[in-house]
């Protein structure tokens, strides 16, 4: 994991009259907005499938994070001894999402299978958290900086208010979001996933 507070000094250089508390808050918001808009932070959850149990709550595997949405789901074949012997699950046919964090099989499992359900979920930091994935931070730290700068400079009637620069950095921030989406899309083979990057699209039954 990386620490978002590593950006505080770099951002302070652009808004030297801004209280450090505001800087910290806006860096967190920028990171959340980036993750919410790209689904770039992905983690895997493995669940035990139990006979006749259809509903499986999903809990974030990383402290101080929230689940945004389910990215993909697989199920281990019943009676298989190979943990890698899985089949991709289809939304609407094999499962539905009762809530953003609860998967429900459309039919009851007939066998209990350890590590029987493997799901990938996208995450974002909690609003008061400075935790961020290290690889994500290293690759997209400039995006987080741009996001925090535009938010701070857009504050009205402050010594650091600068609407022109706020608009400039907001443009840079969204350029990075689009670039991240493009990079991720190239790595996806599912046509469904390739079409999930527009804000307001319905994904797995929920507006993201």
Image (spheres, rainbow, N blue to C red):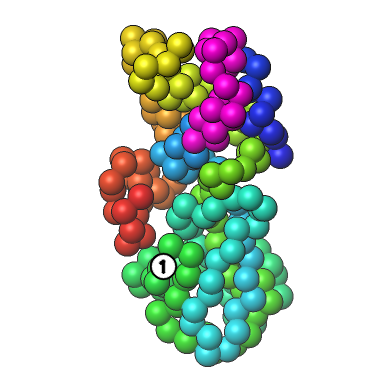
The image position of residue 82, as x and y in percent, is 70, 70
Which residue corresponds to the image point at 36% horizontal and 72% vertical from the top-left? 93
Residue at mark 1 = 99
The image position of residue 33, as x and y in percent, is 45, 37
Which residue corresponds to the image point at 57% horizontal and 11% vertical from the top-left? 16
Q: Is residue 52 above or below residue 31?
A: below
Nearest the viewer among 111 and 53 is 53
Residue 36 in the figure: left or right of residue 137? left
The image position of residue 28, as x and y in percent, is 55, 35
The image position of residue 168, as x and y in percent, is 37, 13
Which residue corresponds to the image point at 34% horizontal and 9% vertical from the top-left? 164
Residue range (magenta): 11-29
Report the magenta stretch's main SS: helix
Residue 163 in the figure: left or right of residue 15? left
Residue 122 in the figure: left or right of residue 139? left
Nearest the viewer among 125 and 153 is 153
């Amino acid at each position: 994991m990386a620490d978002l507070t590593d950006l505080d000094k770099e951002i302070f250089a652009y808004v030297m009259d801004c209280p450090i508390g505001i800087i910290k808050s806006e860096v967190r918001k920028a990171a959340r907005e980036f993750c919410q808009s790209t689904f770039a932070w992905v983690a895997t959850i493995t669940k035990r499938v139990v006979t006749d149990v259809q509903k499986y709550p999903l809990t974030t595997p990383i402290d101080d994070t929230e689940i945004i949405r389910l990215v993909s789901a697989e199920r281990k074949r019943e009676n298989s001894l190979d943990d890698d012997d899985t089949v991709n699950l289809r939304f609407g046919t094999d499962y539905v999402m009762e809530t953003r964090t609860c998967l429900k099989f459309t039919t009851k499992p007939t066998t209990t299978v350890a590590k029987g359900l493997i799901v990938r979920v996208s995450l974002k930091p909690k609003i008061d958290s400075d935790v961020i994935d290290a690889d994500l931070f290293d690759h997209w730290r400039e995006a987080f900086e741009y996001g925090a700068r535009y938010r701070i400079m857009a504050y009205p009637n402050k010594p650091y208010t600068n609407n022109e620069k706020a608009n400039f950095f907001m443009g840079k921030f969204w350029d990075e979001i689009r670039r991240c989406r493009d990079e991720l899309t190239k790595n996806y083979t599912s046509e469904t996933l390739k079409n999930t990057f527009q804000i307001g699209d319905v994904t797995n039954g929920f507006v993201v």
